[in-house]
Amino acid sequence: MLTTISYILATKLAHAAEREDVDYIRYGIEITLSVLLKIVFFIWISSLFGVTAKMLIVAFSFAFFRIFSGGIHLSTFLRCLISSTILFLIPSIIITKDWLFSPVILTVFTYLIGILSTIFFVPISATNRPIPIEKKSSFKWKSFLFLSLWFILSLFFTKYLHSKTFAIYSSFGILIQSYTLTPLGSNTFKMIDKFFDLKKKGGYKNEKII
């Protein structure tokens, strides 16, 4: 549905601008629409549970790290929306600022995990959008830079603004993205796609998710 709408809009824009690169325009429109729809949906669903700010912090920290590190994608927008909603909503609900762990310790732990994930796994290319070899090193350095800036910002919020919210919930966004960079995380996404494929065909029966 989203691809169809994007293609129609791209065709009209390309015709009006007398350009032939419809697919390039469609891709840009599709990405923009998908991001806007996700943000609106995240705000709506999180408001039902009273965790809007928390969920948006988780989602945006995940998204920004993903921009610089890359990552595997599910095969449809709806699957991505459902999966990301669950991934972001659960920690936003069950994690509270009153937990006994120190936000500073959590921040340091998350930073180390992010750095290790970057060293060993970044960048991760989407199947339909491979990253050119000459650009791979820049993904690593941009990921290192992002994580370092996030680390400093988290400590600033905790130490000087006396706010635990940003450090705690952004840490979970970084940790979720770090997990998706690993082979185990990649296999998890493949299993989710497999699950939806089987549901679409009418159930598991004797098939096994591998």
Image (cartoon, rainbow, N blue to C red):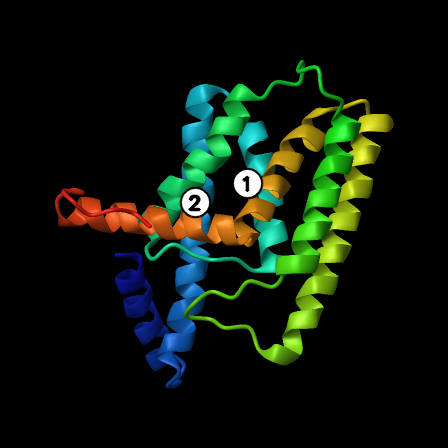
On screen, residue 57 above or below 49: below
The three-letter amino acid code for the residue at tag 1 is Ala
Front one among 18 and 185: 185
Q: Is residue 76 left or right of residue 48?
A: left
Q: What residue appears at the point 33 percent right and 64 percent down from the top-left corner?
A: 6
Secondary structure beneath label 2:
helix
Count of numbered marks: 2
Secondary structure beneath label 1:
helix
Q: Position of residue 76 (x, y in %)?
A: 32, 55
On the question of residue 51 being in view, the answer is no
On screen, residue 185 above or below 54: below
Q: Disc 2 designates what residue?
A: 38
Q: Is residue 99 left or right of residue 145?
A: left
Q: Quadrant of the N terminus?
A: bottom left
Q: Is residue 130 left or right of residue 69?
A: left
**Circle number at residue 59:** 1
Q: Position of residue 97 (x, y in %)?
A: 66, 18
Residues marked 2 and 1 touching at CB (< 8 Å): yes
Q: Nearer the viewer, mark 2 or mark 1?
A: 1
**Circle number at residue 115:** none
Q: What residue appears at the point 14 percent right and 42 percent down from the top-left corner?
A: 205
Q: Position of residue 150 (x, y in %)?
A: 75, 44
The three-letter amino acid code for the residue at tag 2 is Lys
Q: Quadrant of residue 85?
A: top left
Q: What residue appears at the point 16 percent right and 44 percent down from the top-left corner?
A: 206
Front one among 178 and 173: 178
Classify 10 Å Cα crowding around label 1: few (below 14), some (14-19), many (20 and above): many
* Of pointers 2 and 1, the one earlier in the residue sequence: 2
